[in-house]
């Protein structure tokens, strides 16, 4: 529960998915033939309806699930993102939500393009967060050291296992998974802060990420013991130059630039999705 308090958007997403699933269940079920028909009424992805102009069926399915097990596994995946990767802190609440939704939309759009079947689920969006996390670990690999490498390998293992399961199991939408993963990775490469865009702010507290010592004007380097992913410092040792614990933590110097990049990402994804819908409307299934 503590992780969810520190990650409010993740908490809201999990609660929203659970509440919506309960409501859908009460109105006709979420699995079986009747459940599929009910999900279509609620806005599940359905190719013919999207071709007819119901484009919102690329967004709503991110919050719908086919059966309780589907919901459970996806919410566990979302919680893992908060617990292990802390992507909401890395991207900020707005950026985190943008990546989540855009990845889910891309996943649904690509799945719609290749299949008219009914589909629902947050997995494309969650895979997108894994993709963005992968981008972060790669871009900051020198700063994160062995901790980042181990986390990256664990992530790739989890993603690989899920894709293999999708290949050998009926009813798993690997198209949405892979498309969401790639979308999240590409968006991450574009928007994620790098070490050279970080400045000094505020006092050091346990768990802060430290780059240099403000007390000696940044000429001395603080050191610490890296803990979880992203190089969080669990112990702080004095600056080698001034022997004091300085006052610097990481924060992006390009907040306005980051916001602009997220807006541009939304525009690009919207254009991409519109092109897919138009092409499929012309081609048909």
Image (cartoon, grey):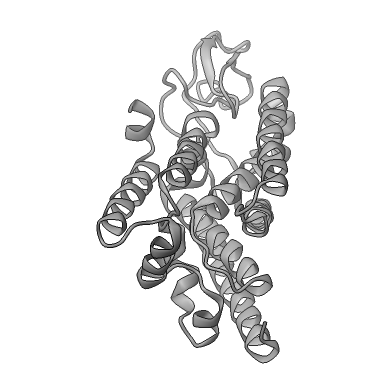
Is 227 situated left or right of 36 in this image? right
Quadrant of the drawing holding the N terminus: top left
Question: Which residue is most to the front?
Answer: 33
Q: Position of residue 254 (x, y in %)?
A: 54, 52
Q: Which of 35 and 240 lies nearest the eye of the viewer?
A: 35
Q: Which of 204 and 268 lies nearest the eye of the viewer?
A: 268
Image quadrant in which you'd find residue 280: bottom right
Q: Position of residue 40 (x, y in %)?
A: 42, 70
Q: Position of residue 67 (x, y in %)?
A: 42, 49
Q: Residue at x 73, y 27 (%)?
A: 149
Quadrant of the drawing holding the C terminus: bottom right
Q: Residue at x 66, y 54 (%)?
A: 174
Q: Residue at x 42, y 66 (%)?
A: 60
In the image, is residue 253 above or below residue 138? Answer: below
In the image, is residue 167 above or below residue 278? Answer: above
Is 199 situated left or right of 285 in this image? left
Q: Position of residue 233 (x, y in %)?
A: 54, 18
Question: Which residue is most to the bottom?
Answer: 282
Number of callouts = 0
Q: Which of 40 and 18 lies nearest the eye of the viewer?
A: 40
Q: Residue at x 49, y 60 (%)?
A: 120
């Amino acid at each position: 529960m503590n992780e969810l308090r520190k990650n409010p958007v993740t908490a809201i997403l999990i609660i929203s998915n659970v509440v919506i699933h309960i409501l859908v269940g009460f109105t006709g079920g979420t699995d079986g033939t009747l459940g599929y028909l009910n999900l279509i009424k609620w806005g599940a992805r359905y190719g013919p309806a999207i071709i007819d102009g119901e484009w919102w069926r690329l967004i709503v399915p991110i919050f719908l699930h086919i059966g309780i097990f589907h919901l459970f596994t996806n919410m566990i995946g979302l919680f893992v993102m908060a617990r292990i990767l802390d992507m909401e802190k890395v991207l900020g609440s707005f950026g985190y939500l943008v990546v989540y939704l855009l990845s889910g939309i891309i996943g649904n759009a690509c799945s719609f393009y290749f299949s008219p079947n009914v589909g629902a689920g947050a997995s494309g969006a969650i895979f997108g967060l894994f993709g963005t996390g992968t981008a972060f670990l790669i871009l900051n690999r020198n700063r994160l050291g062995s901790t980042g490498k181990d986390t990256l390998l664990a992530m790739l293992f989890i993603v690989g296992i899920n894709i293999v399961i999708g290949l050998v199991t009926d009813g798993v939408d690997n198209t949405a998974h892979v498309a969401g993963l790639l979308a999240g990775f590409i968006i991450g490469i574009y928007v994620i802060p790098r070490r050279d865009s970080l400045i000094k702010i505020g006092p050091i507290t346990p768990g802060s990420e430290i780059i240099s010592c403000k007390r000696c004007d940044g000429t001395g380097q603080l050191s610490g013991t890296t803990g979880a992913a992203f190089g969080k410092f669990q112990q702080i040792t004095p600056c080698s130059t001034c022997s004091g614990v300085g006052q610097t933590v990481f924060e992006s110097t390009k907040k306005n630039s980051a916001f602009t990049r997220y807006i541009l990402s939304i525009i690009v994804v919207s254009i991409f999705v519109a092109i897919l819908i138009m092409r499929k409307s012309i081609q048909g299934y």
